[in-house]
Every structure is written in structure tokens, then in C-alpha cells.
């Protein structure tokens, strides 16, 4: 039902106020809004999927304006230009973004309240140092995944509202991740240990990516993908149930960020095939920088110490387990690229041979 707010019923309203200033009744008389379109709440409540009805659910491929006006309303012309540079849907969109936003809102948690900090126990020195070193690293790298969306969000056309809303949830998630790893480093008396230049170099190259889609490939697909896989190892690397809980909670959030990025890149490539090469070039560089971070002697020794339950068994248990997990990390990344519509197996410069992965027989189902 459209335009039921007929002008006739309001024809005799005053044209000026008592001081003589003109009044505007156009919102009442002449609205072109979809008056009467009424979304129905689902069993969960009124979701963003529920309200994507009629014209309100249509996200234009190239919005004609660059305004903050809510998509679907009547807009006064001319309207100020907000300076958006991401004005194509394919530059920011992913088909799962509404669902991911709803999931993010429903699954927020508190690093203060939802981690059983009181159950921390005294650990052997080497293990406490190792978890503190890992937490120092994670506390640093987590925040880039807040800074980067923040850098680009105000440049995104507001008609892509749901994508911006999802990125807001990512920013909150990453603040909590940075918080929870900082808290874990301090909570058992070990404290924050070493930050190395290679880690910061990776973060800088993500932040300085030339386009949002390149930045998304470096951050969501590559960086956060690897972090997600580290969180998935939580059961193996956690000295106590406290860390297991931390990794489990952070993993849920991280999986959403990676899911958005993977389907965003897929959407981008499907709607603009030329963008694939741009993404490949970013990943050519990003993979090399990530390799430097992933093979940092301090990070690898800390991880291997946690896998071995201490330095004593690092050669017999820590390093062999770490090699197995490295294969998983790489195959998982390559499979993610395939899901995003990007074949990296034949192009990557990552040392697949060292890990026994044959590009000719690799199957992306891993
Ligand atoms: Fe995170
Ligand atoms: Fe993340």
C-alpha cells in the first residue's frame, strides 16, 4: 500500500506558525514512502532480515546519492554530498551481512564477566611466559581489525547500511579481544612480554591497503583467517580451562568476521571480475609479510611450548605438533580463498612444498 497519506485530509492545515514562519507539511501530505508496508517479527523478534521488505530491502548496486538519509525514505534535493568513495555495492557487500549482524548482536559477551578469572591457577614459569607472549601478540594484532573497518566505514555509501552496521559489531568484538588477551597476560602475574617489528609491519601493510576490498582480503581472509585457526587450536594450547573459554568465545566472533570477508570477496569478484587480480596482488604481498610474522622465533617458540606443555618436551612434542598444525593453517587458508572465488593454490608463494602440500593434488574441501 503506497501513498495512503492523501493530501486532501490535511488540505486546511496552517501554512505559517503564529510568528509568521512558514510550516512544512510535506512529510504528512505527500510522502512517497511505502506507507502500510509492515514487516512481521519472526520467532527471534524483529530482525534486519524481517524488515528487508518492499523497497526497504532493496540495496542499489550504485546509489544515486551520497547522503546519510536512511535508505528508502524521501530525500530532499539537493542534499549534501558526504564524500563517500565506496559507492558500488560490490565494494562492501556480502550476502550474509544481515544474518551476521543479528548473530553478532545476539552473541555479545563480556571479558569482565564471562571468563572464570577466579579459576586461574599458578602455572610453571615457562608455560606462563608462553601464554603471556601469545597474549601480548594477540592483544596487539586484534586491534587492527577494529582500526581498519573504522578507517573505511565513513567512506562507505550509507545505502550499504547493513554492511556498516556489521562492521560496527566487528569493531566492538575486536575491542573485547584486545581486552581479553591483555587481561589474561596480566591476570596471572606474568604480564605483557615482547612486541616484535614484524607484527607491526603486517598491521601497517593491512592499514595502508589502497582499496577496501584489498584491505578486506588482507584482514578478513588472510589475517583473521589465521587468527581464527589459532583460536581453533585453543583446546591444544590452553594451559587451563580459563584460556580454553577465552579462545572459544573469541572464536565465535572471529568466525563471523571471516565469514563476512569471505563472502564479501566472493560478491566482489562475481560482480566485478577485474577485481580478482587486485585481490591476488594484495595477497601476494600479504602472504609474504604474514609468513614473516608466523615464523617469528618468539611466536613459534611460545606456541610450541604451549603445545608441549612446557619447554622440556618441545623437540619431541611441541615442534612436531606445530608442523602438523601449520599444514592445517595453510590448507584452511587455501580452502577459504577457494570459497571466496580465488584460486591461490597455483599462485601462492607460501612454501607449500615444505609442508608437503602438492598444489596439483590439493583439494579445497580441507
Ligand atoms: Fe579478533
Ligand atoms: Fe576479527
Image (tube, rainbow, N blue to C red):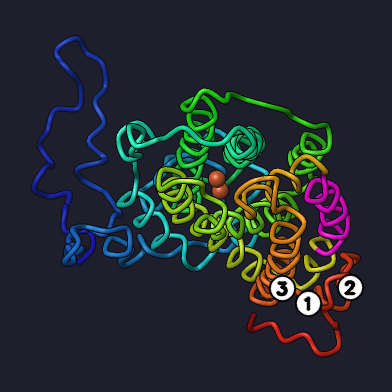
- In this view, the residue farthest toward the top is 19
Please state if 273 lies on the left or on the right of 44 as rendered: right
Q: Residues within 10 Å of mark 1 (few under 14, many from 20)?
A: some
* Residue under the point 58% across and 41% down: 153
Alpha carbon separation for disc pair 2 and 3: 14 Å
In the drawing, what numbered circle is on residue 343? 1
Q: Is residue 65 visible?
A: no
Q: Are marks 2 and 3 in contact (CB under 8 Å)?
A: no
Alpha carbon separation for disc pair 1 and 3: 12 Å
Q: Which residues are magenta?
A: 280-296
Which secondary structure, mark 2?
Answer: loop
Residue 28 higher or lower than 220, as above or below = above
Q: Are marks 1 and 3 in contact (CB under 8 Å)?
A: no
Q: Which residue is mark 3?
A: 331
Please state if 53 lies on the left or on the right of 143 as rendered: left
Which secondary structure, mark 1?
Answer: loop
* Residue under the point 76% across and 48% down: 300
In the drawing, what numbered circle is on residue 347? 2
Which secondary structure, mark 3?
Answer: helix
Alpha carbon separation for disc pair 1 and 2: 8 Å
> 340 or 89: which is nearer to us?
340
Return the disc, 2 or 3, that comes first in the chain's sequence: 3
In the drawing, what numbered circle is on residue 276? none
- In this view, the residue farthest toward the front is 312
Q: Are marks 1 and 2 in contact (CB under 8 Å)?
A: yes
Please state if 40 lies on the left or on the right of 336 as rendered: left
Is the C-beta of the residue carrying label 2 under 8 Å from the nearest atom of ligand 2?
no
Amino acid at each position: 500500500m503506497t501513498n495512503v497519506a492523501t493530501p486532501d485530509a490535511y488540505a486546511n492545515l496552517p501554512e505559517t506558525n503564529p510568528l509568521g514562519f512558514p510550516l512544512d507539511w510535506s512529510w504528512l501530505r505527500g510522502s512517497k514512502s511505502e506507507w502500510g508496508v509492515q514487516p512481521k517479527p519472526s520467532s527471534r523478534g524483529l530482525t534486519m532480515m524481517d524488515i528487508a521488505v518492499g523497497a526497504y530491502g532493496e540495496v542499489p548496486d550504485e546509489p544515486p546519492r551520497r547522503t546519510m538519509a536512511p535508505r528508502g525514505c524521501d530525500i530532499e534535493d539537493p542534499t549534501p554530498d558526504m564524500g563517500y568513495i565506496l559507492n558500488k555495492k560490490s565494494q562492501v557487500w556480502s550476502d550474509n551481512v544481515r544474518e551476521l549482524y543479528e548473530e553478532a548482536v545476539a552473541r555479545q559477551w563480556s571479558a569482565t564477566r564471562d571468563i572464570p578469572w577466579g579459576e586461574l591457577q599458578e602455572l610453571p614459569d615457562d608455560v606462563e611466559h608462553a601464554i603471556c607472549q601469545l597474549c601480548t601478540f594477540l592483544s596487539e594484532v586484534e586491534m587492527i581489525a577494529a582500526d581498519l573497518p573504522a578507517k573505511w566505514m565513513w567512506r562507505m555509501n550509507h545505502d550499504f547500511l547493513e554492511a556498516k552496521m556489521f562492521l560496527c559489531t566487528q569493531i566492538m568484538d575486536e575491542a573485547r579481544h584486545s581486552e581479553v588477551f591483555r587481561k589474561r597476560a596480566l591476570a596471572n602475574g606474568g604480564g605483557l612480554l615482547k612486541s616484535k617489528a614484524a607484527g607491526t609491519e603486517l598491521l601497517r601493510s593491512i592499514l595502508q591497503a589502497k582499496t577496501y576490498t584489498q584491505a578486506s582480503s588482507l584482514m578478513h581472509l588472510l589475517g583473521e583467517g589465521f587468527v581464527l585457526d589459532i583460536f581453533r587450536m585453543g583446546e591444544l594450547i590452553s594451559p587451563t580451562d580459563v584460556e580454553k573459554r577465552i579462545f572459544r568465545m573469541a572464536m565465535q566472533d572471529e568466525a563471523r568476521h571471516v565469514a563476512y570477508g569471505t563472502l564479501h570477496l566472493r560478491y566482489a569478484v562475481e560482480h566485478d571480475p577485474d577485481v580478482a587480480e587486485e585481490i591476488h596482488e594484495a595477497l601476494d604481498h600479504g602472504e609474504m609479510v604474514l609468513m614473516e610474522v608466523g615464523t617469528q622465533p618468539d611466536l613459534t617458540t611460545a606456541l610450541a611450548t604451549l603445545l608441549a606443555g612446557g619447554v622440556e618436551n618441545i623437540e619431541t612434542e611441541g615442534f612436531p605438533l606445530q608442523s602438523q598444525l601449520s599444514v592445517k593453517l595453510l590448507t584452511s587458508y587455501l580452502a577459504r580463498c577457494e570459497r571466496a572465488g580465488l584460486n591461490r593454490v597455483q599462485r601462492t608463494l607460501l612454501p607449500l612444498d615444505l609442508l608437503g602440500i602438492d598444489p596439483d593434488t590439493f583439494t579445497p574441501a580441507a
